[in-house]
Image (cartoon, rainbow, N blue to C red):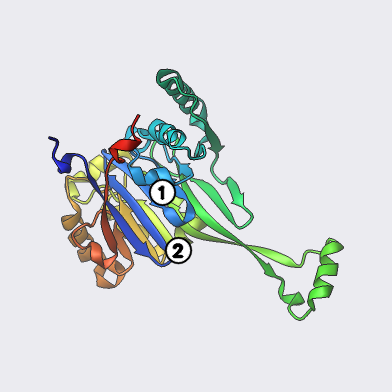
Amino acid sequence: MVEKSFLVQKFAKLGIGSLHIVGYSVAGEETVVQIPELNVCFDIGRCPYFALTSDFICLSHTHMDHLAGLGYYLSQRHFQGMKAGTVFLPREVERPVDALLKCWRDVERQGTPYKLIPMSAGQMYELRRDFGIRAFQTHHGGVSLGYSLVSIREKLKPEYANVEGRELAAMRKKGIEIQYRIEVPLVACLGDTTTGNVFDHPDVQNAQILITEVTFFDADHKTKAKAGRHLHIDHFVELLPKLKNEHIVISHVSRRTGIRRAKQMLRKRVGDEQMKRIHFLMDFEHAKDAGEIEDSAPPPPDTAE
């Protein structure tokens, strides 16, 4: 009989304001981060079961630890009678990813439906009138994008504040613009990246929640960070003063350091006050401070073919 420990994966669930950050992220192993209330996953990892519930996937780049579960995600949604998954991805990799998924169709002998939406840096895709996904360039070598989830709001122009409703409606019919648009970045996720201009992007600096990797922490790992185009703690400490986010979630920490030690090292560098807004996604030991630890297990046997 197979032990339960081989069947169940622990993953994090952080409650931050009205949103939850659900996921698993360990450097070189797997990264998948879900915002269930916004119906979006950043990357797909090996597709743990919670990820199946998101209609939209934002792929940052095509390294296997971020992409491997894509075919499974699409196939399982089709098998379970869910609507086709929609995948945002860098425009330059649309063709090879499409070819890969078509191969899986042939191998599985199943016409799995899917929708690929190629994105370029700076492009906004409006899923609804009040919600969009914006892509921005990151610095991981090759092609890589980060994404922000943006609340789109229409506000009445101040000069019309005292105008009655019927008059406003008449002005609308005449084509007069009585409102202005506000874009509020709710969550920005960088995927894998080193330091660079991405940290000057308004969505990155101002999102209510920023999800960023900090892979390496030890002094002698700075060369590894440079070679792999990842963030080192030194980079993050330098960048922190320009980040205005209410909350920052750190992902992709290397097992070479571990969460406990990484957290202690960062606290020594930035102090207790800054640490109030910084969360480590995989901080299971102190999960009660921010959320819960949950299990991702296979579906019940009666759902299998």
Determine which quarter of the picture holds residue 193. Answer: top left
Q: Secondary structure at mark 2?
A: loop
Q: Residue placed farthest to the bottom in the image?
A: 162
Viewer can see residue 81? yes
Q: Looking at the picture, which amino acid does disc 2 mark?
A: Gln
Residue that appears at 55% across and 37% down: 117
Query: Against 285, is 94 above or below?
Result: above
Q: Looking at the picture, which amino acid does disc 1 mark?
A: Leu
Q: Does label 1 or label 2 sit earlier along the sequence?
A: 1
Question: x, y percentage for residue 95?
Answer: 51, 25
Q: Secondary structure at mark 1?
A: loop
> Is 146 on the left or on the right of 9, as rendered?
right
What residue is pinned by disc 2? 208
Give the class, few, some or many, for how many residues have Cα within 10 Å of label 1's Cα (few <14, many ≥20).
Answer: many
Q: Which mark is residue 190?
A: 1
> Is 116 on the left or on the right of 164, as rendered?
left
Viewer can see residue 42? no
Quadrant in the picture for the C terminus = top left
Question: x, y percentage for residue 239?
Answer: 36, 58
Q: 250 or 174, which is in the foreground?
A: 174
Residue that appears at 37% across and 49% down: 33
